[in-house]
Image (tube, rainbow, N blue to C red):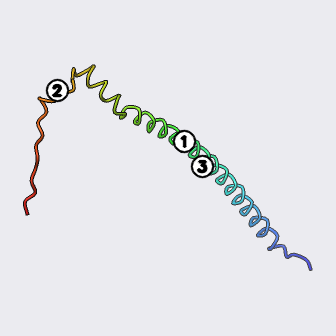
């Protein structure tokens, strides 16, 4: 069976169009994969930073650190027992 003279140019241009679509799709896939890898790297860096900040927060919030800072920077001292006043609140129904 012989291809008609009209079918060959149509098939040739269809093949060119589909080839261009395949090349474009593959390029877009590569580009998206590269972007995904960059986002994964950014996510990993942010997770590392988050862990570091959690450790730093834990260090700053330790009781002895807060007490030392209050004594050194603010001049605070523990009151004597006779200076402590306890206020009791009664519940009313």
Disc 3 from disc 2: Cα separation:
62 Å
Q: Name the residue under label 3.
A: 36
At horizontal 10% and vertical 50% (from top left) the residue drawn is 89
- SS label for mark 1: helix
Vertical placement of residue 88 versus 3, above or below: above
Within-10-Å neighbours for mark 1: few <14, some 14–19, many 20+: few
Q: Which mark is residue 22?
A: none
Mark 1 vs mark 2: give the one in front: 2
Mark 3 vs mark 2: give the one in front: 2
- Which of the two residues, 51 or 89, is positioned nearer the viewer here? 89
Q: Check contact, mark 3 vs mark 2: CB within 8 A.
A: no
Q: Name the residue under label 2.
A: 80
Indicate the position of residue 75 as horizontal and vertical percent values. 21, 20
At horizontal 58% and vertical 46% (from top left) the residue drawn is 40
Q: Quadrant of the N terminus?
A: bottom right
Indicate the position of residue 15 as horizontal and vertical percent values. 77, 64
- SS label for mark 2: loop
Q: Check contact, mark 3 vs mark 1: CB within 8 A.
A: no
At horizontal 26% and vertical 22% (from top left) the residue drawn is 71
53 horizontally vs 61: left or right = right
Upstream in sequence: badge 3 or badge 2: 3
Q: Mark 1 points at which residue?
A: 42
Disc 1 from disc 2: Cα separation:
53 Å
Residue situated furthest left in the rendering? 92
Q: In which quarter of the image is the C terminus?
A: bottom left
- Rendered image quadrant of residue 18: bottom right
Within-10-Å neighbours for mark 3: few <14, some 14–19, many 20+: few
Indicate the position of residue 78 as horizontal and vertical percent values. 21, 26
């Amino acid at each position: 069976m012989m291809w008609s003279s009209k079918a060959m140019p149509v098939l040739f241009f269809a093949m060119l169009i589909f080839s261009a679509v395949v090349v474009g799709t593959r390029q877009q896939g590569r580009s998206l994969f590269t972007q995904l890898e960059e986002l994964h790297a950014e996510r990993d860096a942010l997770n590392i930073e988050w862990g570091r900040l959690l450790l730093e927060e834990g260090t700053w919030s330790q009781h002895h650190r807060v007490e030392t800072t209050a004594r050194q920077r603010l001049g605070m001292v523990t009151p004597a027992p006779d200076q402590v006043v306890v206020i009791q609140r009664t519940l009313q129904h």
